[in-house]
Amino acid sequence: MYLLLRAGLNMRLPLHLFSGLAIVMSGCLLLMGKPPVLPVPVFTVSGPDAKPMQVRTADNRATLVVFVSALCPISTDYGPRLESLEQAFSSQGVRMLLVNSNQNESDSQVETQRKLSKIAMPVYRDPQGRLADILGANATPTAMILDQAGSLRYAGAIDDSRNPTRVRKPYVRLAMEEILAGKSVTLGRTSARGCSIKSSNP
């Protein structure tokens, strides 16, 4: 049975930026809809030292933002795969950022889970969930790929299975390879299954 969770998710932005809906199926949030049409060339997150850090997409060939959670079991299952993506693309001019937008998770919980997941990358915080709102992220894990101009080229699931042995379609890896090759992304939007992001924004 499908349950409508909410529509017009980003009410603080013009409605034409994001037209989507979220449904809950089997306890997981399923994100559906269109990505924003306006570029996001600059955005801000908080570093491990709690200081604001500005990110400029023009500084890299592509920017991969993955929204994660310290408490969502689906998100924490992806630790090794996140490390694999970073290792595969960091040497090719791709900047990868793990971002936690959940306001109900403490910094200590985030850091503890990062270590348990054996993730070498830092996990940045998204105060009040502003970045999640701008990009239209509603669940963890959700991956977003921005090109040098800040245009959203891919949004959705990291791959097609929570179980790494059953992955047949590595969505993020395929989309990134196409972007780096100067090609159009064949599949620019997929449904992200996971736990809802608990931002402080309505």
Image (cartoon, helix red, strand yellow):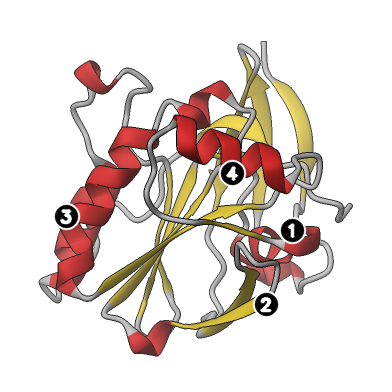
Of labels 1 and 4, earlier in sequence is 4
Q: Position of residue 107 (x, y in %)?
A: 70, 48
Residue 111 is marked as 4
- Disc 2, SS: strand
Q: Which residue is mark 3?
A: 88
Q: Position of residue 19 (x, y in %)?
A: 65, 57
Name which residue type carries label 4. Answer: Glu
Of labels 1 and 2, earlier in sequence is 2
Label 1 with label 4: CB-CB less than 8 Å: no
Question: Within the image, what quadrant is residue 62 found in?
Answer: bottom left
- Give the answer, above or below, for where 102 lies relative to 19: above
Label 4, label 2: how many angstroms apart (C-alpha)?
A: 17 Å
Label 3 with label 4: CB-CB less than 8 Å: no
- Disc 3, SS: helix
Nearer mark to the viewer, of 3 and 4: 4
Q: Which residue is mark 1?
A: 129
Residue 52 is marked as 2
Label 1, label 3: how many angstroms apart (C-alpha)?
A: 28 Å
Say left or right for 164 vs 100: left
